[in-house]
Amino acid sequence: VARAIVQQPDVLLFDEPLSNVDAKLRRRVRAEIRDLQQRFGLTAVYVTHDQEEALAVSDRIVVMDHGRIAQIGTPHDLYDRPNSRFVADFIGDANLIEGEVAGGTFHAADLALPVSGPDGPALVSVRPERIALEAPDAAPLGTVASASYLGSRMEYVVTTGFGDLLVSAPITAQALTPGAKVGLRLDGAVRTARDGGMTA
């Protein structure tokens, strides 16, 4: 990188620069690359298949699908407002739920969410950390299928009437165990295209 910067290039190209670097070292190196890029005001094209890495180092991201541009946007745009099933699933973990929209409400089994767009078949995307597990006294309801302790958080798979959901939850004094009944609150659900095209 230092040798390239000395040449004062118009554009720096990084092609999977951290693919063989240890995970902890990777975080430090990508932060240093980002710092150098901003400090010297360099334009950089950074190619990676690591979605977390792309979110961390980029001002704008181009998601490619079989040689075609699927979506262009800021990291926040792509993570919070994916325009297709492919982008939602490619950038981070996503729960994709099929249902129907009627009168501005998305319905799937006992789930009802406010959405925009026309009535008819629809797909919504909800990130695992945007699902809260609550007391099983209000719909939608689910059953914990598996629970995994990941140190900084718990990861649950919850079976519902509209499919299995991946839920990332903070550590609590009493972790849920498989078979536990839970209520679900889904925040930040985004309507996205069902066929890989743009949303309506």
Image (cartoon, rainbow, N blue to C red):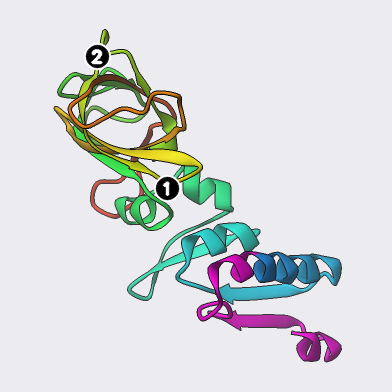
Image quarter (top left, top right, bottom left or bottom right) of the C terminus: top left
Q: Is residue 157 magenta?
A: no
Residue type highlighted by circle 2: Ala
Which residue is the extreme one toward the front?
173
Q: Is residue 11 left or right of residue 199?
A: right
Q: Is residue 22 magenta?
A: yes
Q: Kindly indicate the quadrant of the structure image that contains residue 121.
A: top left
Residue receiving disc 1: 82
- Residue 103, relative to residue 190: is it above or below? above
Q: Camera-side residue: 102 or 34?
A: 34
Magenta residues span: 1-27
2 or 1: tag closer to the N-terminus: 1
Q: Residues within 10 Å of mark 2 (few under 14, many from 20)?
A: some
Identify the residue at horizontal 59%, vertical 74% (top origin).
Answer: 46
Residue receiving disc 2: 139
- Residue 111, relative to residue 28: is it above or below? above
Q: Is residue 90 left or right of residue 32?
A: left
Image quarter (top left, top right, bottom left or bottom right) of the N terminus: bottom right
Q: Can the viewer see residue 32?
A: yes
Q: Camera-side residue: 158 or 195?
A: 158
Q: Camera-side residue: 108 or 1?
A: 1
Question: Measured from the top left, where is residue 161 in percent x and y?
Answer: 14, 27
- Residue 13, relative to residue 173: is it above or below? below
Q: Residues within 10 Å of mark 1 (few under 14, many from 20)?
A: many
Q: Camera-side residue: 73 or 90?
A: 90
Q: Kindly indicate the quadrant of the structure image that contains residue 6.
A: bottom right
Give the structural element (helix, strand or loop) at label 2.
loop
Report how many numbered discs are placed on residues in the image.
Answer: 2
Identify the residue at horizontal 50%, vertical 73% (top origin).
Answer: 48
